[in-house]
Image (cartoon, rainbow, N blue to C red):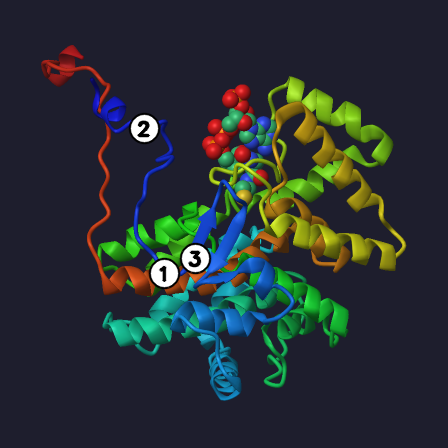
Amino acid sequence: MTKAEESNSKGGMEGTVAATTRLSDVQGLTGKLIYCGYDINDLAGKVNYEEVVYLLHQGQLPNCSQLESLRQELTRQRELPSGAIDLLRSLPTDTQPMNAIRTVVSALGCFDPEANDVSFEAQRRKATRLIAQIPIVTAYFHLSRQGKPLPYPDPGLGEAENFLYLINGRKPNEEEIETLDLCYVLHADHGMNASTFSSRVTIATLSDMHSAICSAIGTLKGPLHGGANEGVIRMLQDIGSLEAVDAAIGEKLERKEKIMGFGHRVYKVLDPRAPLLMRVSQRLGDKVGDSRWIRMSQRIAELMKEKKKLNANVDFYSASVYYSLGIPIDLFTPLFAIARTSGWTAHVLEQLTNNRLIRPESEYEGPTDLQVKPIDER
Ligand SMILES: CC(C)(COP(=O)(O)OP(=O)(O)OC[C@H]1O[C@@H](n2cnc3c(N)ncnc32)[C@H](O)[C@@H]1OP(=O)(O)O)[C@@H](O)C(=O)NCCC(=O)NCCS
């Protein structure tokens, strides 16, 4: 029996427990998501993103003064070093935002005031800085690629509000703020997802916070993970109308194409974040008098259930929510990264508190017993 057969592996480390965590629990059979003991359905609409950041980093929800201190700290840490701004301004304007963010986060590790300090306390401070800085990097890159000036973040604004203010150059309304804030809450953490795993693998070598977050950003970018939300809206745009949905999805399935925003490694029932986002998407569509995207989405969901027994995941409805907010499509995955930085950094710190090198094995299936020939005989 091979090592893979012995460990009953289906590949992709399915079913493998890579770490214990107190941060979040993804219950695939019941469709529940828990952050530090709280059900996502209870958190959604009752707490804001900053409260979730506190929860993931402190293990409990904050009281008013704890929340205020965290807000002030995040506001203080938003400023980017001038070297990082020069770097993002120097990137080609057609750089994919996820690549720009990964590059600038790496540079932030060099410009960090505690760049060479890998003590636990320094890593904790770096975590707060990254949670505060990654939204600014994203907004500034977006402005810079359009040749626009880079305004100061507004210290009076919370995380979601400040991001919308920076990219749009105007203060968002209450509905826009609440919508983006809810998206941040729903994307903050999700068990041992691929990007979180890669951040834990990196820090487990006793590397550093910025390296771990660069690993995570690079992992999130792919279309099988966070990149799926951009794929969803591009698919809806390609299909174009409700009438064209059935034929288009039928053809894609015939060609064995993956439909972005469906399926999940862990959830065998509906992803609990999907209906929360679907309701927001529906409300926003009704409000702007354009329910085309949500109606197309709902038809795709029916077809996928019927033909493939697959449910929508978080990316399926977040795409139409972001679209209704007027956010450029290539900033959808960066928004996921902004929110998930709270979870990634919490996992990195958790890994450090009980660390062991993460080092799985592979099953060798290449040739054996080959003899080296002199180079002129090969
Ligand atoms: C999320 C995902 C990567 C999970 O992958 P996985 O656990 O490795 O599952 P598999 O890719 O092995 O899929 C199992 C079966 O379902 C099918 N399937 C899974 N997701 C599918 C999708 N989105 N569209 C069509 N078929 C899908 C596979 O083709 C496979 O069918 P088969 O057994 O006939 O070959 C996968 O569902 C996917 O690619 N989804 C689309 C991308 C996406 O939305 N990612 C965001 C996840 S939050």
Residue at 45% across / 63% down in the picture?
Answer: 37
**Residue at numbered disc 1:** 22
- Disc 1 CB within 8 Å of nearest ligand 1 atom: no
- Disc 3 CB within 8 Å of nearest ligand 1 atom: no
Labelled pair 3, 1 in contact (Cβ < 8 Å)? no
10 Å neighbourhood of mark 3: few (<14), some, or many (≥20)? Answer: many
Place of residue 81 in the rendered image (x, y in percent of width and height, measured from the top left): 45, 76
Relative side of 373 to 239, left or right:
left
**Distance between the alpha carbons at the discs numbered 3 and 2:** 24 Å
In the image shown, does 239 or 249 lie closer to the viewer? 249
Mark nearer the viewer, 3 or 2? 3
For marks 1 and 2 on the same chain, the one whose residue lies earlier in the sequence: 2
Amino acid type of the residue that numbered disc 1 sits on in the rendered structure: Arg
Secondary element at tag 1: loop
**Residue at numbered disc 3:** 24
Residue at 63% across / 78% down in the picture?
Answer: 151
Secondary element at tag 2: loop
